[in-house]
Amino acid sequence: MKPAVRRRPPEHCPRSSGCSVAICPLDPEQAKRVSLPGEPRCELGKARRTRIAAEFPELLPERGLSATEFARWLDWETMPEGEKRRRLETLKAARLRSHVGRSSTDSEGDTTDPGQDSAPRVSASQAVGEEP
């Protein structure tokens, strides 16, 4: 009886039979590969690639990530905890601003919500009679 042959990581990719990328994130030798400008890149989602790569930790130290994704992951993993918290807070604030920024501003600077009547919102200071 022959021993079972374990498939290589790229063979676990659902797109492997028709794939033509020069650098496959599931290739244990991806660091040795070269890609020319304009060549196709892997389009398999990162979550799926990392699930496949988790089955081959000894072969895929890059965890199924592209070179850029791996470099960014490594930067994050080696970053001091205080810097991580600062960056997460910055992102959180930016998301809040982008959510709030979905309202429009009229010519006088008053804010109105899209989809509601065009009456300007009144600030708390205006509501009690103070000048803005």
Image: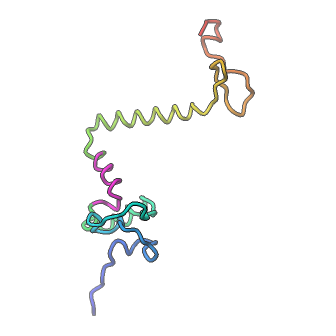
Left or right: where 8 falls relative to 47: left
**Displayed quadrant of residue 102:** top right
Give whichever of 43, 63 is nearer the camera.
Answer: 43
Q: List x then y, in percent, for residue 127.
A: 65, 12
Q: List x then y, in percent, for residue 128.
A: 64, 8
- Point out the image quarter for the C terminus: top right
Q: How is the image coloured?
A: rainbow
Q: What residue is shown at x 25% (from left), y 45% (from top)?
A: 78
Q: What residue is shown at x 72% (from left), y 30% (from top)?
A: 116
Q: Main secondary structure of the magenta part?
A: helix
Left or right: where 112 falls relative to 50: right
In the image, is residue 71 above or below residue 19? above
Q: Which residues are magenta?
A: 62-75
Q: List x then y, in percent, for residue 2.
A: 27, 91
Give whichever of 67, 77 is nearer the camera.
Answer: 67
**Displayed quadrant of residue 20:** bottom left
Q: What residue is shown at x 64% (from left), y 11% (from top)?
A: 126
Left or right: where 55 falls relative to 40: left
**Displayed quadrant of residue 89:** top left
Q: List x then y, in percent, for residue 43.
A: 46, 63
Q: Residue furthest front?
A: 37
Q: What residue is shown at x 34% (from left), y 62% (from top)?
A: 64
Q: Residue furthest right?
A: 117
Q: Residue furthest bottom?
A: 1
Count the marks. Answer: 0
In the image, is residue 112 above or below residue 126? below
Question: Does the magenta portion include 72?
Answer: yes
